[in-house]
Amino acid sequence: MAMIFVNPTDIGERSIQINDKGDVHHLTRVLRLREGDVLEISDGEKWEYKAVVEYIDTGCIMCNILDKQAHAREPNTRVTLYQGFPKAAKMDTIIQKCVELGVDTIVPVYMDRSVVTDKGKGEKKLERWQKIADEASMQCRRGKRPEVLLPLKFKSVIEDLKSYDLILFPYENEEGRTIKVALKEFAGRFTGKIENARIAVVIGAEGGFSDKEAELLKEIGADCVSLGKTILRTETAGPATLAMIMYELEL
């Protein structure tokens, strides 16, 4: 069964209340949840629970807590994806797949070669994107809901990037340094298990990075890397980079 998320305020010392209309409908009408069934529930922050359904009422499911544990499925490495704004529904796919692969945060970015421009509709899109992220995290039973932030312009991103432990910048013009080498060097900084490392991944839009954007990233110390011999589409590059990071640093 999928992980169900509730607000921490809906969790008591011995019981949990599920009152989101969408979740209640899905659990009772689609999954045919009944009294006595066991659920996995997360507070979306730190704790996950096993709970048995005590009773089902209109718009509410009350559960008794059986077990409480700290999240065990979340990566130790926190990856933020700065995704060059793609056209059409590609962002939906990028969000879904990157959440499944363990991304922590996703930030859409308007870049010089983005086909999509800022028309002031970011908040409306954000609601849909967050719903996609929530559904993906529940389906793959993650312990937390990755956050999708409002779109930013590229210049605003540069200052944010300076706070990360590693900035990966997959670039189609890079022919020497591979992401494999960059990740092995990064892992070599740690004497034991990598804990709470923050990595930023910057992916260009359909037209790739402009020369100016590439230079700005290099100036702040972004690690310019190749993802392989072929050039990947923007909707492929983000998930591919996430998969490589998780393989090298988490498995």
Image (cartoon, helix red, strand yellow):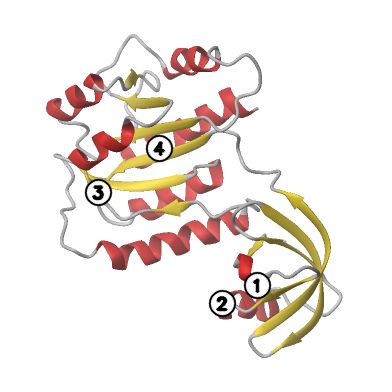
- Is residue 242 visible in the rendered image? The answer is yes
Residue type at the position of mark 4: Gly
Q: Are marks 2 and 3 in contact (CB under 8 Å)?
A: no
Report x, y in % for residue 33: 76, 76
Residue 237 is left or right of residue 189, and the answer is left
Residue 166 is left or right of residue 75, and the answer is left
Q: Earlier in the sequence, mark 2 or mark 3?
A: 2
Residue for badge 4? 238
Q: Is residue 89 above or below residue 240?
A: below
Q: Residue shown at 65%/23% (left/top)?
A: 193
Give the quadrant of the N terminus. Answer: bottom right
Q: Tell me the SS state at disc 3.
A: strand
Residue for badge 3? 152
The residues bearing labels 1 and 4 have C-alpha atoms spaced at a distance of: 35 Å
The residues bearing labels 2 and 3 have C-alpha atoms spaced at a distance of: 30 Å
Q: Is residue 175 above or below residue 222?
A: above
Q: Earlier in the sequence, mark 1 or mark 4?
A: 1
Q: Earlier in the sequence, mark 2 or mark 1?
A: 1
Q: Is residue 196 above or below residue 4?
A: above
Q: Which mark is residue 10?
A: 1
Report x, y in % for residue 32: 74, 78
Residue type at the position of mark 2: Gly
The residues bearing labels 3 and 1 have C-alpha atoms spaced at a distance of: 33 Å
Q: Alpha-carbon neighbours of circle 4 within 10 Å: few (<14), some, or many (≥20)?
A: many
